[in-house]
Amino acid sequence: MDRYDIIVVGAGPAGMTAALNCLRAGKSVLVLEGDSFGGQISFSPRVENFPSYQKISGAELMDKLYEQISEWGAQIELEKAQSIVKTPFGFELTTDYNTYECKSVILATGVKPRKIGVEREDELVGSGVSYCALCDGAFYSGEDVCVIGDANTALQYALVLSGYCKSVHICTLFDKFFGDKALLDLVLARPNVRYTHNLALKEFIGEDELSALRFENTQTHENVIVDAKCAFICIGQVPNNTSSLTRQAISLRTKTARPLAKASLSQATAARRKYANSLRRLPTVRLRPSTHAPTRTKCPTAKHSGAENSAPFFSQTMTIFIDVDNTILDFDKCANQSITEACDFFGIPKAQELCKIFHPYNLSLWQQLERKELTLDELLEKRFNTLFDMLGVRADGHAFEDYFHKGLASAAVPVDGAKDLLEYLSSKYDLYVASNAPLSQQKNRLAKADFDRYIKGYFVSAEIGHLKPEKEFFDACFKVVKDKPQDVCMIGDSITADINGARNYGMKTIWFDKYQTGKSADCDFCVTSLAQIKDIL
């Protein structure tokens, strides 16, 4: 069993700072993190109030701190602490993978968002209530949203949301803002941002999803209705001290003369936590029983083993359509690689910051494209130019876009389990790629990943002249594939392009919820790992 002087539970700013000071004192230190390194600040695109840095992204700041404690000799493990007990040596701490001993423990278990305490708040989380604009904002691209709060977090969220939402309405309880003036000036300069002071939230309006909010004016006591598809609540944070580990630590603290140190730290956001956990465990497959086949309903929350239910449902299936990006190739990692190379080429020192804000903004643009709210040319025209404006970078977005595409054409990072899945599917079915990306780009990337040998043919929007989810896209596919739509299954990560498009055409559908969003989709089966598909087909 490994022994340390000190174990720090949590690798956010507080935890890593505590580790640094312990290391400087000559102690051996183990840092444990169950979610993701850096905490909530790593999701901030711009930090301007940290001493010695005029402007830096949260991710870059945390990367520097991570490197610093690594150079000082910290042992760092991505493991979740499960239990802590007192021993003659000091303490024994058990994670989901190992057991360690130490003389002292520092709990830096962070904070969690403060809830506003209005009826149906918990019920609507994920359906119009959110505590993280950086995680969920892109899902409301082109929609009216509301931000509830009056300090820096609310202002930062409003600034980010203004980049892809139709309008942002900031509602504050008091008669003024309490955030930094520099940040407030940036927010109020956005033409699609407005605010109303002296509002107390009274009711969430909407059945299954939020449609509006009812406030009461604290001065006039009049009702104020604010139309919004999502309410981003940012009214502060509370200590994340309700876990079993913390309760054990508190109990030990009262029983021993050696108290456990406590530190405050930011907790990783829900979306990042789901992603991190998906890399560490195989989630349970969510299946819809075959008896539901004639009637399309939302993907159920009931969980089944799957194989016995899915076999009859897919007994006539002969052909599989499969998406590429974020289905069998990890687009996010490929894009980050290409962005970093382009930043190096053009001398732009903000690669990490650009990668952070690229993904939600790019997702929002593609959702607009799929809804026919903009063209592909318009998307390519505004994508990097808008991002550079948000970062205050002077650069040619057109030239950067060209270089990015060249790099992306050779980037091929497989999704976990993709090779095994393709080998399995190609041995049983005719396997076709169905993608909205350029043909040459996808062929090159799949060839580099050695996936092209599994593919019988390619259906791409640029060649067809229509995008998924348009009916015309699938019309073109079925001119080549002679099977009936009900005998063909579509596998993809996009609810709009892959699942809704195929479902509307009469095809069977498997939604790959890669990041375990927990969102509901009108699909036949929902999986959170590619390995689960082999149990269905």
Image (cartoon, rainbow, N blue to C red):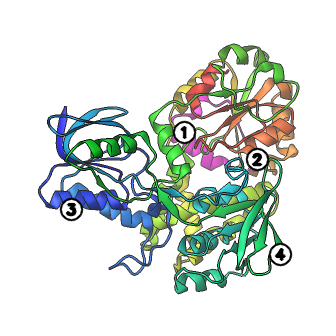
Against 367, residue 45 (above or below) is: below
Front in this rendered view, residue 435 or 194 = 194
Task: Locate residue 259 relative to residue 347 in the image: left or right.
Answer: left
Percent of width and height locating residue 58: 43, 66
Nearest to N terminus: mark 1 or mark 3: 3
The image shows residue 73 at horizontal and vertical percentages of 18, 53
Q: Measure how far apart labels 2 and 4 are at the Cα level.
A: 40 Å
Q: Label 1 to label 4, Cα distance in Å?
A: 64 Å
For the magenta stretch, what is the residue range?
438-461
Whether 236 is drawn above or below 257: the answer is below
Element under disc 4:
loop
Nearer the N terminus, badge 1 or badge 2?
1
Q: Which residue is mark 2?
A: 496
**Magenta stretch encompasses residue 440:** yes
Name the amino acid, label 3.
Asn
Secondary structure at badge 2 equals: helix
Find disc 1 in the rendering and name its residue.
447
- Please give the residue where the numbered disc 4 appears in the rendered image: 222
**Residue on which the image places disc 3:** 21
What whole-number distance in Å separates the C-alpha atoms at marks 2 and 3? Answer: 49 Å
Cα distance in 3D space between marks 1 and 3: 49 Å
| 10 Å crowding of disc 1: few (<14), some (14-19), many (20+) | some
Q: Is residue 34 magenta?
A: no
Gap between marks 1 and 2 measured at Cα: 27 Å
The residues tagged by marks 3 and 4 sit, at their Cα atoms, a distance apart of 53 Å
Check if mark 2's residue and mark 3's residue have beta carbons within 8 Å: no
Q: Which sits earlier in the primary sequence, circle 2 or circle 4? A: 4
